[in-house]
Amino acid sequence: MEFKTISVIGLGYIGLPTAVAFASQKVKVIGVDVNQEAVDIINQGKIHIVEPDLDTAVQSAVSAGYLRATTAPEPADAFLIAVPTPFKGDHEPDLAYIESATKAIAPVLKEGDLVILESTSPVGTTEKVAEWISEQRPDLVPPPFNTQNPTLKIKIAHCPERVLPGHVMRELIENDRVIGGLTPECSQASVDLYKTFVQGDCIITNARTAEMAKLTENSFRDVNIAFANELSLICDKLDINVWELIELANRHPRVNILQPGPGVGGHCIAVDPWFIVDKTPDEARLIHTSRLVNDGKPHYVVDLVKKAAKKYDNPTIACFGLAFKADIDDLRESPALEIAQVLAESNIGKLLLVEPNITKLPNTFSKITHVTLGTIEDAFQVADIILLLVDHKEFKTIPAEALKDKVVIDTKGILQ
């Protein structure tokens, strides 16, 4: 199947790199995003997010005429939906962005087009996409949509991204892709599309299994991290160095415990397990418990800081790191950011936020006068309590003498 024009809906941390990956192969790409500012920045050949190598790739793609951004969908041969899937209520998946994106492209779809849902989604969402298109375009997906014997005049599939922030451009190309179409023809068309730039294997399954595969991958990691975080609580109580303990245990040839931290963040590991719990609450007991362990860790860290702050009269607390992982600017579902917010609201002292990857305070702190954004050097001069929350490269070279006479709470084992 030939794809002369590809449209990517959602130009965030996944959509923009994906658009660039296609454009780098000299395929015309139309990027669509509701954020006019992001669209304008991209059309200038610049980027609105931080990701290594993305800036030069965008500049090259835009200047060569293969990538253009807009706020409204236009006709294309393939449409990739890469929009957020946040929560609503009590960890209930919110599919509003996917529904809105689907209904936005429906008027410009034509017979034979390919629609791929890349957004990480609860099981059954790809079928929902078909139903939403059917509501808008019954000529392309005749109602009622039947999952057992679908009648489609377009092709619909799910292909979840599985890349690591900070390495997205490389992993988009090298990683294997799991592709689940609503029909075998949908799957094969999707393989043809991704092989435009993907060097890894494209593995075909059905849509529901593809959806569950991504959720399973991140739930596995969440459970492992929960084990490490629970160990850290136990070791604190028993006066054992958890970092040394894990290093020793991992010398067993069949043991690979991950590292504990202040919680679990990002729009994948902290979110995806809840999609399984929401669908199968009675069965997903271990996954649910792991979520509770990891979501509870930030509160434990806050309690440690409050206990340390009692030794001072209006102390200055320096939070080292706000991003959800090292060396990126992404604050989504970040436990470090949550901890900083709770400390700011607790009003137990002044808060100095040290995050090398951002240039201004997040909006949530804009009206809090006792919170400032500063540098590592600022923290060394004024902080009474140093709270290490993210293992950014800048923090790994902190000299021991700079921390002399300060209370240090190290949630990432940086100083071990």
Image (cartoon, grey):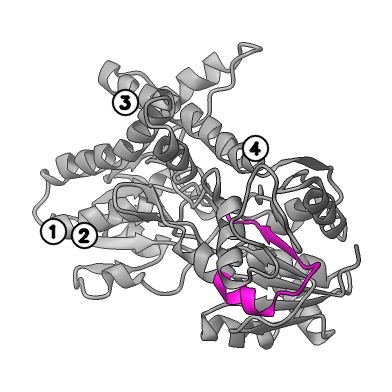
Q: Earlier in the sequence, mark 2 or mark 3?
A: 3
Quarter of the N terminus within the rendering:
bottom right
Between residue 30 and residue 406, name the one nearer to us: 30
Measure the alpha-carbon separation of dots 3 and 1: 25 Å
Q: Amino acid at mark 3?
A: Leu
Q: Earlier in the sequence, mark 3 or mark 1?
A: 3
Residue designated by label 3: 233
SS for callout 2: helix
Between residue 6 and residue 237, name the one nearer to us: 6
SS for callout 3: helix
* Labelled pair 1, 2 in contact (Cβ < 8 Å): yes
Left of 131 or right of it: where is 387?
left
Give residue 349's position: percent from left, percent from top: 15, 58
Kindly report which numbered mark, 4 or 1, lies closer to the viewer in this rendering.
4
Measure the alpha-carbon separation of dots 1 and 2: 5 Å
Residue extent of the magenta highlight: 103-119
Residue designated by label 2: 344
> Residue 209 shows which numbered tag?
4
Left of 71 or right of it: where is 108?
right
Measure the alpha-carbon separation of dots 3 and 4: 35 Å
Give residue 227's position: percent from left, percent from top: 43, 24
Residue designated by label 1: 347
Q: Amino acid at mark 1?
A: Asn
